[in-house]
Structure formats: structure tokens, C-alpha cells
Amino acid sequence: MSTSANQAATELPTLWWNDGDAFRSRLFDAISLLLPCGEHFVVIAVNDWLNTNSHNSSNPRLQYEVQRLVKEEQSHSRAHRLYNERMAAHAPAQRLEQRIESAMQQMAGWTLPTRIAFAVAFEQLTVLLAEQVLRPHNAWLGQNDTQQTKLWQWHCKEEIEHRYVVQEVADAMKIGQTCRALIFLVAACYLFTDITIALASLLWADIRARRVGAARVSLQAASFIVRATPSLLRMAGAGLRHVVMMKS
């Protein structure tokens, strides 16, 4: 076996950290590429709300919860930036992150109510996924004891713990429920598109580098879709209930 083949064989268990599954490993890698910019967007939005309400102490509990959320989101962002830097050694991570960052920079110029509504949507969508990832024997995250698995479990737990904080900020700002419902749908389409593009780019780079075969990835993708269908339906149902409740 050649030196390059030896190196590739050594790297594969780390690359396919999610129970040796290339498709599911890259799915979470693709999601990670979105998180530093997404977390930063949420942090800036709620910090702007804090700054505009610094003189108003009518809800000190919410202000405290927002400050705690900011610290947690900053920790998530740092962890995923390191995660993505390591990924860049064998994937087009930097190029994909730059594309996402460019989109987020455009959103930074929007009005504060619009940014808060998008922050609510991003947080709620993250929670919908986190709930499925933390279910026992789920189709998403393996049970192996890797650094990546521990990172995702930690992140998902904290997202669920502060799931209502940005929603309370939106309530305090009296952002309309219909507006929030429509933005939730837009955000869902945006995230689905970006995750799909990032996932396809990562897998294509792996196939071109012969780290994994197209047939193997296709079989793993099909297996994931079959196994994850119940959780995807639960996510869709929870998302639909969320929209209907906001519109009612």
C-alpha cells in the first residue's frame, strides 16, 4: 500500500466520525459550516435589542436570559469555528463558509425587528433538529464516543435549554405573529438550501478525492432517508404547528 493510501486509510475513521457513515458525517459537517455565522447573527441581533433597552429595567429576567444566551451562542460559535478549521484540511470548508458569511452580511443591514424575527426562526429550527438528534437510537447521530458526537450533543442540549429566549425578545418588541410565521418559512427554505449545497459540495469533494465512492454515498443517503423519515415528519409537524400557532 502506498504512503498516500496509508494516510487516507488513517484519516477515514476521523472523517467518517458518525458511526463510520460518510453521508451522515458530512451532513453534520455541512450544518456546522452554517453555525458560526448563524450564531453571530443571533448574537448581534439580541445585543442590539439589549443596547436599545439598556435604560428599560421593566424585565430584568429577560435581559439576564439574553446575556446568558449570548455567552452560550458565542461558545457554540467558537467551538464550530475550530471544528470547521479542522474540516478545512480535507474539505472546501473555507469557500463554503465565505458564501454563507456573504449572505449573512447582507442580512445584517435589515431592521432590528426583521433580524429578531429571523433569529427566532433560526433558533426554533435548530431546536426542532436538536430534539431529534438527542432522541435515543435516532437516525441522525451515532452512539460512538467521538469529539464531534460530544460537541453536537452539548450544543443540542444548550439550544433546547434557551429555546424561548429570542421568542420572548420578539414578544417584547411586539413583532407580529403573521410576520414571524412567514419569516419562519423563509428561514426554513434558506437553511434547507444552504445545507443541501454544503452537503453536496463536501461529498463531491470526497468522491473526487476518492475518499468514498459514489455508490456507497448513495446507499448511505437512501438508508438515512428511510430511517430518518419518522423524525423528519415529526420535525415538519412541529414546524407546522409552530407556524399555525403564530398565525392564530
Image: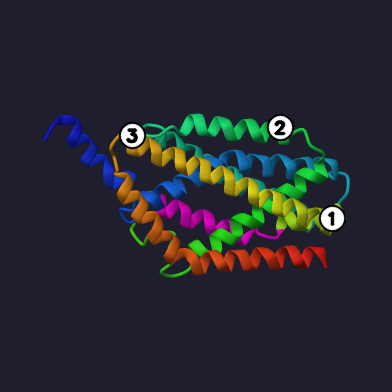
**Separation of marks 2 and 1 at Cα, in angstroms:** 25 Å
Q: Is residue 246 magenta?
A: no
Q: Residue at x 50, y 37 (%)?
A: 81
Task: Please state which of residues 37 and 20 is positioned toward the viewer in this rendering.
Answer: 20
Q: Nearer the viewer, mark 3 or mark 1?
A: 3
Residue 106 lies, in percent from the top left, at 71, 32
- Magenta-colored span: 148-164
Residue 18 can be seen, yes or no:
no
Task: Please tell me whether residue 161 belongs to the stretch shown in magenta.
Answer: yes
Q: Could you tell me how far apart the alpha carbons at marks 3 and 1 are, in whole angstroms? A: 50 Å
Horizontal and vertical percent position of residue 67: 70, 48
Residue 19, picture quadrant: bottom left
Mark 1 sits on what residue?
172
Q: Nearer the viewer, residue 208 or 242?
A: 208
Please provide percent x and percent y for residue 193. 58, 45
Which residue, given by chain and number where applicable, does mark 2 sit on? Answer: 106
